[in-house]
């Protein structure tokens, strides 16, 4: 059947002609109101990109998908350049600092020179007297608190009472030019009272005279602990007699996103008194909310305009105090105010990955099953909460997959210190623990004399299962990812066989694809994402979404899915996502949610438009939509392409009575997960999986590590745009390599951040980049848009452990301080030499592997599970599967009816307190409300006792030592 | 980041340059020389000792000379290539400086006269205020050194130029010009402690040219640079070595990025050769013992010192090949 000669341009309307050849009076000849695209004729259907389940040729090994019938073979699955790439490569994209409004003033921020100090007074009279200064503002102008999470609003536009780190905001000025503004900063007269600062997160667990924040009755004693978490699942009795074990204590430095564009903001109160705020934000909606709170202005009087974002990676997802400052200054000055950060200020606002102390213990039993993960994570939050509440959970719960565990135990604590605030960064909360866990598995495999890939393959959770903490796993491409990197890297001929200084290592990853809980509302009341589509007579399709394209390509993804459903070339789709005035409310770009949630909403909206077009075509052709086909700007009868109408004809017919076509679509995640405290943390409608193999060269004399090759397999469900997915994988490798090899926020002896610039903060250059073989695994997620899941954050996780494990393979030294800078590796080698009484590093022997008796058992189980997984993935086996089945857990019976050992706990038992890890020790402290209650009880007791004095003396219990007292008080609390 | 204002002078001859310097000095006005500006201007933006006047050497014809034995101070590092008949050791060293983009602007003179660097010094004004300034940029406060507190007399900022040790082992000399006239001296004598003084330049004097002796071309050299990344980074330690192949007496070793000035290790080499056979490893240990890096660069001093041995060994093995 030939298809390709059907014209897409509707002709001009035929003039009605009178018998004498003249035009009928009042009957104008109308030219066509739109064009059907630049190609005059229809292209044939691209069957290679139409699923085999609906008659195409695209293989669907995972079975059919609900969106298969919405595929038109137009653009989904094809590598296309991002739709905004022309603007970017020609330098015409307008980033934060490119916004120039007439009459703008330059804002500058006065920052704290002290780590921790009380502001006793600020005198601004000299500043105000400086010619050219138009507005000055201090903390007292904006006393309302804000924060990205409603539960931890602890930030002000500028310090209200105390400054909490060097670089904290104190005041701001707006002046006619930058030099005047800079000069003005030196004219503030401030009386300070310094307070003893805290830098070491371990000291944050101790009581202090002046905790960095005060949470009232919820404050934990007088410590600087912001959040503590305890979680225990599974059968802890399995831990007691392990066959193999691994134990490692890690120190991970804080790292920064290192995005290219520094923060910049322009605020302008328009003539109607509405605030127009231009800012490169990942999450414009939170800024919108925070502005409303801080400025005491209703949200509808604020329009947040997201400029192009020059990289975010989580570092532009908080509402920021400088955004408030610009708005406050602009309101005072009556003119637009622009604030652009220097690089150093970017480091002071930070929100990078938490510096962490992580301890991971794990055990395996004689069958090579993973009987326990014990994780303790103490994370350094810096001066503010930011996303820390969530990070505290993620450090544990995101380690509960992809492996089936006998038991899981997590203690976590986030402490405030007098440093720039840590926050969310690509791979939020999961990266550090993942590295520790994957290296632990490598170590455990070694002690079991088995291949670490086979150990993993024999312990994977299947598709459509539940993790030990209650996460619902749907599609799962973990096994395929592992198998493909094993094959691609020729693992079996290299692992433990390379010469000294050359190594190969494996690491896996698991990440959420969209947070199941919208931070600011109940998903039952309001969807996660909404998309509006409007199609007017010109045929162009305008898509309104609040999804923030931060370079990851969300605009392209949304344009692609609309293009796919409507069978229109992508240049006919125009995505409008910059302004909160026109965009439906969206949660923004974080937690890898945009493709999953927005594209799903966009598909629904596009189906709404498509159905209107099909209905019109039905009226015109007389064929029911069920037998109509959409392909390249044309709708035609399935069995005879000659019988059809062009897209524009159908569109004009459809809008004859209503005008422009409008449709909207929304996405909300299904109800899922447990009900326990913290159950929502880490809950997502889908999860991504990845496995990387890294090859490294280690210079054994200098300790310099260079990563030479990476085989990176990532399960993104379905690659809507393979080029974009590969870009994310390679970019993730770069970012992860930075963290594992060179990037580090260095805090010196005095607590100052020593390297707040891009020369000393060592982001890998092109020379340090290995060859990355990006392998896309497509497990087709049943709920993802066309099967897609995230690809933005998950791909970062495995590179860290893969490199650390490869370094071990190269030199036989386990290193647990990140980054593995040459001095760390060198010190490790030297220590190793001393231990082995060797003179020169060249004498070291790299580790070797002789398969033990467990190896064939694991291989056999892996093979068995491959078939199990295949059936489950294709929904040919729909039985329930809950973590623990491997250990005899019956998935069809409730927890209470399982054998005795299985439990869930969210607070430590008194007898556990003594053996908790570093972060776990936060559970030795009591909350203020409990302390008060106990004091109250004690007072009551004293009164009671004074009423019956004599007997009481006789019954007085002997004084106890501190420890048992603690145990007792914990017990009381538990009973309460 | 805003550049503080300064007046830029553009002399077209050495005489004019010296004249401008002399008259500024007479009026008591501070100034800096600038060649490529890749070191001075970032420091200015950070308000590290900015001056009201800057004299550019860019338009002085003589400063652009480049041949096998003469290299002008204005020659961009990118021009130090073997096509220009430059000694292979200098080609190797220049190619390891910063990044290819920076080498288009950065010059030989600028690299030799590079300001010393320190974690506590190469920071913004706000940052330095937060540590109450430091000895090298004390803003009139008489602040103490932050690297080694309580000594207050010495600046221990580190010299991190790559070219100096290589010129040293090629026996280069330099031509300095100032109001007092011109003088030529061996490059090894150019550097003088401490981290603030850096070199022997007198007020109003600048480095115009580097001369290489005729026999430099016969020398075989090797430069080993320690850095975290293969681009951008200043050396954390650098060892240059050269000899007239087969002649141990001609052996020269120099180091950089370990102390406030680069150093020619004449004494260590002589002691070693007097003691007996030329043994790269034994000599490497000697050189290692003679340097004392401090904690003010990206990598810890202990590690940098350990690496001196490895780098020296590799440099020596490199020239033996």
Image (cartoon, rainbow, N blue to C red):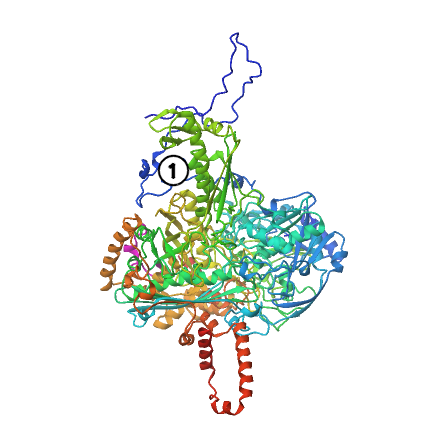
Residue A791 to residue B282: above or below: above
Q: Nearer the viewer, residue A754 or B287?
A: A754
Query: Does residue A944 appear in the picture of this structure?
Result: yes
Which quadrant, please, contains the N terminus of chain A? top left
Toward the viewer: B187 or A273? A273
Apparent side of residue B235 relative to residue A687 in the rendered image (left or right): right
SS type, badge 1: loop
* Residue range (magenta): A488-502
* Nearer-the-camera pick, A20 or B176: A20
Chain at tag 1 = A
Q: Which residue is mark 1?
A: A71
Residue furthest top as drawn: A20
Place of residue A93 in the rendered image (x, y in percent of width and height, measured from the top left): 56, 42
The verdict on residue A491 being magenta is yes
Asked if the magenta segment contains residue B205, the reply would be: no
Q: Position of residue A626 (x, y in %)?
A: 36, 33
Q: Is residue B135 above or below residue A709?
A: below
Q: What residue lies at 34% left-to-right and 36% top-to-bottom?
A: A48
Above or below residue A3? Residue A478 is below
Expressed as whole percent of the image width and height from the top left, the position of residue A659 reads 53, 31
In this rendering, would B173 be left or right of B271?
right
Is any part of residue B42 visible from this angle? no
| Predominant SS of the magenta segment | loop
Count of marks, rendered view: 1
Point out residue A310 in the picture as x, y percentages from the top left corner. Answer: 54, 48
Classify 10 Å Cα crowding around label 1: few (below 14), some (14-19), many (20 and above).
many
The residue lying at 30 percent from left, 70 percent from top is: A242
């Amino acid at each position: 059947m030939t298809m390709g000669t059907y014209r897409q341009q509707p002709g001009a309307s035929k003039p009605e002609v009178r018998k004498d050849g003249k035009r009928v009076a009042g009957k104008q000849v109308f030219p066509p109101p739109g064009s059907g695209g630049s190609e005059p004729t229809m292209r044939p259907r691209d069957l290679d990109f139409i699923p085999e389940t609906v008659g195409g040729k695209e293989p669907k090994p995972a079975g059919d998908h609900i969106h298969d019938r919405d595929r038109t073979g137009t653009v989904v699955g094809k590598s296309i350049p991002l739709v905004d790439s022309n603007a970017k490569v020609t330098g015409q994209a307008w980033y934060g600092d490119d916004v120039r409004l007439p009459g703008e003033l330059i804002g500058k921020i006065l920052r704290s020179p002290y780590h921790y100090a009380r502001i006793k007074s600020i005198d601004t009279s000299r500043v105000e007297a400086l010619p050219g200064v138009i507005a000055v503002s201090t903390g007292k102008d904006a006393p309302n608190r804000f924060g990205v999470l409603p539960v931890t609003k602890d930030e002000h536009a500028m310090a209200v009472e105390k400054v909490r780190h060097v670089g904290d905001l104190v005041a701001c000025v707006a002046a006619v030019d930058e030099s005047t503004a800079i000069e003005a900063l030196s004219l503030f007269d401030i009386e300070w009272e310094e307070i003893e600062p805290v830098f070491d997160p371990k000291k944050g667990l101790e009581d202090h005279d002046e905790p960095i924040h005060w949470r009232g009755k919820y404050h934990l004693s007088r410590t600087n602990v912001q959040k503590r978490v305890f979680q225990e699942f599974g059968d802890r009795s399995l831990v007691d007699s392990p066959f193999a074990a691994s134990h490692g204590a890690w120190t991970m430095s804080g790292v920064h996103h290192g995005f290219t564009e520094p923060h910049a903001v322009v605020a302008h109160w328009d003539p109607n008194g509405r605030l127009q705020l231009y800012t490169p934000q990942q999450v414009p909606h939170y800024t919108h909310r925070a502005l409303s709170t801080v400025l005491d202005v209703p949200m509808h009087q604020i329009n947040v305009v997201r400029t192009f974002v020059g990289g975010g990676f989580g570092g532009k997802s908080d509402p920021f105090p400088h955004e408030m400052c610009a708005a406050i200054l602009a309101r005072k000055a009556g003119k637009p105010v622009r604030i652009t950060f220097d690089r150093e200020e970017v480091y002071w606002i930070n929100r990078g990955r938490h510096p962490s102390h992580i301890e991971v213990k794990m055990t395996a039993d004689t069958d090579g099953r993973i009987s326990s993960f014990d994780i303790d994570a103490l994370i350094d939050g810096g001066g503010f909460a930011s996303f820390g509440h969530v990070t505290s959970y993620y450090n544990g719960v995101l380690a509960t997959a992809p492996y089936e565990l006998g038991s899981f135990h997590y203690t976590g604590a986030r402490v405030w210190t007098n440093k720039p605030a840590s926050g969310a960064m690509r791979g939020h909360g999961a990266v550090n623990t993942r590295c520790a866990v994957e290296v632990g598995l490598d170590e455990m495999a070694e002690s079991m004399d088995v291949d670490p890939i086979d150990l993993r393959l024999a312990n994977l959770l299947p598709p459509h299962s539940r993790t030990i903490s209650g996460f619902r796993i749907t599609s799962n491409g973990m096994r395929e990812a592992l198998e493909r990197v094993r094959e691609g890297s020729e693992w079996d001929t290299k692992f433990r066989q390379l010469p000294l200084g050359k190594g190969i290592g494996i690491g896996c990853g698991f990440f959420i694809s969209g947070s199941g809980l919208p931070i600011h509302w109940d998903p039952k009341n309001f969807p996660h994402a909404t998309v509006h589509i409007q199609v007017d007579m010109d045929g162009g399709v305008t898509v309104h979404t609040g999804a923030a394209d931060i370079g990851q390509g969300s605009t392209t993804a949304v344009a692609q899915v609309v293009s796919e459903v409507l069978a229109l070339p992508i240049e006919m789709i125009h995505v409008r996502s910059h302004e909160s005035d026109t965009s439906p409310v969206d949660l923004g770009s974080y937690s890898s949610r945009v493709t999953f949630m927005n594209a799903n909403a966009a598909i629904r909206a596009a189906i709404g438009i498509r159905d209107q077009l099909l209905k019109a075509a039905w009226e015109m052709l007389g064929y029911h939509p069920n037998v109509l086909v959409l392909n390249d700007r044309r709708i035609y009868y399935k069995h005879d392409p000659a019988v059809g109408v062009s897209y524009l004809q159908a569109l004009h017919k459809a809008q004859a009575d209503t005008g422009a076509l409008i449709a909207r679509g929304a996405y909300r995640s299904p109800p899922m997960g447990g009900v326990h405290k913290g159950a929502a943390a880490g809950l997502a409608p889908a999860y991504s999986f990845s496995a990387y193999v890294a090859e490294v060269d280690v210079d054994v004399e200098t300790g310099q590590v260079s990563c030479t090759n990476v085989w990176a397999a990532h399960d993104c469900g379905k690659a809507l745009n393979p080029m974009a997915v590969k870009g994310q994988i390679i970019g993730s490798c770069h970012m992860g390599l930075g963290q594992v090899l060179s990037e580090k926020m260095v805090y010196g002896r005095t607590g100052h951040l020593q390297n707040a610039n891009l020369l000393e903060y060592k982001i890998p250059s092109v020379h340090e980049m290995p060859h990355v073989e990006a392998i896309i695994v497509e497990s087709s997620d049943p709920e993802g848009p066309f099967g897609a899941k995230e690809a933005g954050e998950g791909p970062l996780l495995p590179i860290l452990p893969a490199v650390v494990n490869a370094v071990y393979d190269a030199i036989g030294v386990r290193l647990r301080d990140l980054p593995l800078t040459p001095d760390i590796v060198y010190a490790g080698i030297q220590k190793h030499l001393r231990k082995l009484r060797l003179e020169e590093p060249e004498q070291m022997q790299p580790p070797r592997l002789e398969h033990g008796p467990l190896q064939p058992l694991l291989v056999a189980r892996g093979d068995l599970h491959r078939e199990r997984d295949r059936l489950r993935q294709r929904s040919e086996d729909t039985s329930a599967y809950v973590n623990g089945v491997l250990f005899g857990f019956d998935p069809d019976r409730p927890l209470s009816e399982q054998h005795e050992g299985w439990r869930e706990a969210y607070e430590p038992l008194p007898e556990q307190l003594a053996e908790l890890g570093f972060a776990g020790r936060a559970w030795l402290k009591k909350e203020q409300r409990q302390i008060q209650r106990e004091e109250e009880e004690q007072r009551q007791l004293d009164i009671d006792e004074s009423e019956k004095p004599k007997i009481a003396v006789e019954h007085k219990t002997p004084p106890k030592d501190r420890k048992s007292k603690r145990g007792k008080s914990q017990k009381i609390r538990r009973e309460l | 980041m805003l550049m503080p204002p300064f007046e830029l002078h553009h002399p077209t001859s050495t005489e004019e340059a010296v004249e401008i310097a002399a008259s500024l000095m007479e009026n008591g006005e501070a100034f800096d020389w600038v060649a490529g500006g890749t070191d001075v201007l970032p420091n200015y933006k950070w308000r590290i000792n900015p001056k009201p006047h800057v004299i550019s050497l860019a338009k002085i014809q003589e400063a652009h000379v480049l041949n096998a034995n003469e290299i002008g101070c204005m020659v961009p590092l990118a021009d130090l290539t073997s096509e220009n008949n430059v000694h292979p050791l200098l080609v190797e060293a220049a190619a390891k400086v910063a990044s290819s983009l920076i080498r288009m602007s950065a010059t030989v003179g600028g690299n030799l006269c590079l300001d010393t660097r320190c974690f506590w010094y190469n920071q913004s004004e706000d940052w330095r205020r937060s540590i109450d300034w430091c000895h090298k940029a004390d803003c009139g406060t008489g602040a103490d050194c932050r690297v080694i507190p309580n000594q207050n007399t010495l600046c221990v900022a580190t010299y991190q130029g790559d070219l100096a040790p290589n010129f040293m082992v090629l026996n280069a000399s330099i031509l300095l010009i100032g109001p007092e006239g011109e003088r030529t001296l061996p490059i090894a004598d150019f550097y003088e402690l401490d981290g603030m003084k850096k070199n022997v330049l007198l007020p109003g004097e600048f480095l115009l040219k580097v001369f290489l002796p005729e026999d430099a071309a016969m020398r075989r050299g090797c430069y080993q640079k320690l850095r975290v990344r293969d681009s951008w980074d200043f050396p954390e330690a650098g060892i240059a070595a050269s000899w007239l192949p087969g002649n141990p007496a001609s052996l020269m070793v120099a180091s950089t990025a370990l102390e406030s000035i680069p150093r020619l290790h004449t004494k260590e080499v002589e002691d070693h050769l007097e003691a007996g056979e030329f043994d790269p490893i034994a000599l490497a240990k000697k050189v290692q013992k003679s340097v004392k890096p401090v904690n003010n660069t990206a990598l810890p001093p202990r590690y940098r010192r350990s690496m001196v041995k490895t780098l020296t060994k590799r440099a020596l093995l490199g020239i033996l090949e």
